[in-house]
Each structure stands twice: as structure tokens, then as C-alpha cells.
Image (cartoon, rainbow, N blue to C red):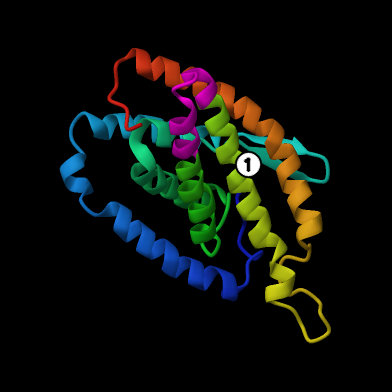
Amino acid sequence: MHIPDGFLSPQTYLPAYAVAAAAWWATGRGLRERLDETLVPRLAALTALVYAIGLVMLPLPGGTSVHAVGVALLALCFGARLAFLGYSLVLLLQSLLFGAGGITALPVNALAIGGAGALVTLGVFRALRGWNEAAAVLLATWCAVMASAALVGLVLGLQPWLAHRPDGTPLYFPFTLPVVLPAVLAPHALLGVGEGVLTLLVWRMVRARRWQWAT
């Protein structure tokens, strides 16, 4: 789902950096008082797990691939603030060490996947957990994957309109929304099911250890 470098115009990533910087600053305020000897190792362990599963690429026809996201697991365990910050760190390390994503695309990836994904997870989970917690985890994870994929597809699909030559030739990403959205959403609809099952398994295991949940 990562947007790589070279796909986004400066008209996109420069404002996104301003928004992301404000979000990083706002979510990072007051964390020193919250991070203690119990929370830090738990956050580190699950962030490392999310980092690892995000490196497992599943190939698709056409030479592209998808991978699990993992932000729903962080959001369910630690809340939206820590999920956003933790996933932003995951994105930064993946882009620097493995070329997954990119520095210019970092703010868009962080906002679309880490920010929106965490908020959607918690919104759906809180709405449905009174009915069935396991189903709420599955649906929250699936919705988070789909919401993030839709935002990524939307940003990519707008690039030909945002940056093009006088003759209309796109300068960056060449495909428009009618092409991009189905191509992004269809495989992630299936991926979201598998990620939901994985999230549920880890959620049950961690909950059995009586961790304090943010949700």
C-alpha cells in the first residue's frame, strides 16, 4: 500500500508534510508522562511485529504487490496517538532500510495509513464491541485497511490532474481515479480479511496476558 518516491507531486507532499508535522507534534505532546517501564516494551514489541509483517510482500498480477498493514493492532492496543506515531516510525524505517515507501511520500503514507487507519479502527471497534468483540476486531481491521487503501488510491489518482504538462501529459503518477481505485481496493479487500484474522489472533493472545487496553 505504500506510495513510493517519485509518484507524488510537490503540490501533494509539501502540504502533506505540513499537516503531518502538525499531527506528529500534537500526538507526541505529553507522551513522556505516559510512557513507562510497562508500556514501552509492549509498544516496542508490537511495533516490531507490525514492521516485520509489513515487509512480507504478496505478489499480484501486473508486477505489483500488497502487504499487511498492522496499524489496527497498534490502535487496538495503544490508542490512536501511539498507533499513529508508531506506524510513522515503521514507515520511516521501511523507507530508509528497504526502500518500501519513500521520504517524499512519508507524510501521505503516515496520514492515510497510520492516522486514518487508527481512527477508523477505533471508531468501528467501539461501535461494534458491545455486539461481539471478536467480530468487532475483524471488521475494524478490514475497514481500516480499506479506508487507508481508498485514501492512498485517491491521492494517487489525483496526480494527473495536479501535475501535468501543458499538453496534459502527467508528470508523476499517470493513472486516474477510475483506474487506480479498483486496482487498489480489490486486492486490499481480500488482504483485509487475512489481516483481520491475524489481528484477532494477536489481540486474543495479548489480551490473555492482561495488558491494559486503550480501547
Task: Kindly identify the residue that appears in the image at 41 percent across and 37 percent down.
Answer: 75
**Is residue 26 among the parts visible in the rendering?**
yes
Q: Is residue 215 above or below residue 184?
A: above
Q: Is residue 134 magenta?
A: yes
Q: Is residue 162 above or below residue 36?
A: below
The residue pinned by badge 1 equals 146
The span shown in magenta is 121-136
Instruction: Name, please, the residue furthest toward the left.
Output: 33
Category of crowding for the residue at label 1, using alpha-carbon neighbours closer than 10 angstroms: few (below 14), some (14–19), many (at least 20): many
| Amino acid type for the residue under numbered disc 1 | Met
Which residue occupies the foreground of this view, 94 or 113?
113
Q: Position of residue 122 (x, y in %)?
A: 44, 37
Which residue occupies the foreground of this view, 37 or 138?
138
* SS at badge 1: helix
Q: Position of residue 74 (x, y in %)?
A: 41, 35
Task: Kindly identify the residue that appears in the image at 75 percent across and 40 percent down.
Answer: 186
Main SS of the magenta part reads helix
Q: Is residue 165 magenta?
A: no
Q: Is residue 29 above or below residue 213?
A: below
Task: Kindly identify the residue that appears in the image at 80 percent across and 57 percent down.
Answer: 178
